[in-house]
Image (cartoon, grey):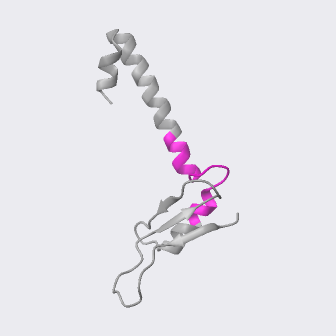
Amino acid sequence: MKIHNLHPWDVSPKEAVRLQGAVLRTRDGIKPIFVSPGHKIDVDTALRLTLACTTRYRLPEPTRLAHLLVTRMRRRLARLSVSSTGSMESSRDRW
């Protein structure tokens, strides 16, 4: 996969600040995503892993699949709530 418009946040060498993250545009014309490292991982590794997990969509595949699963579960729970209470407002208030 080709890296498009990779723009790490500018940090002056004079500043005693370490790079906290990067803005990554996975494709031209698509909103960028913000990548920050986790525990025991640096920014470069976080960027490489993000790109490796980014296939056809803007978001990395694990994040995209988790979002789809949660959305599906929320809809099921909302349908169950509506069928048990008979009221749409009560199911919306829960979220």
Q: What's the residue at 41%, 85% (across, down)?
A: 12
Image quadrant where one finds the C terminus:
top left
Q: Which residue shows up at 47% across the image and 61% down it?
A: 34
Asked whether, in this view, residue 2 is left or right of residue 71, the answer is right
| Rendered view: 5 above or below 95 | below
As drawn, the residue found furthest toward the top would be 86
Q: Please tell me how many numbered marks the rendered image carries.
A: 0
Residue placed furthest toward the bottom: 14
Task: Report the magenta residues as a range.
Answer: 49-67
**In terms of image quadrants, where is residue 4?**
bottom right
In which quarter of the view is residue 14 placed? Answer: bottom left
Taking the view exactly as shown, the residue that stands out farthest to the right is: 1
Q: Residue 40 at what x, y percent from top left?
A: 42, 72
The quarter holding residue 38 reads bottom left
Give the image location of residue 41, x and y in percent. 46, 71
Q: Main secondary structure of the magenta part?
A: helix
Up/down of 14 relative to 9, above or below: below
Q: Is residue 82 magenta?
A: no
48 horizontally vs 81: left or right? right
Residue 16 position, x and y percent, is 33, 86
Residue at the (44%, 69%) spot, across then down? 21
Is-magenta flag for residue 63? yes
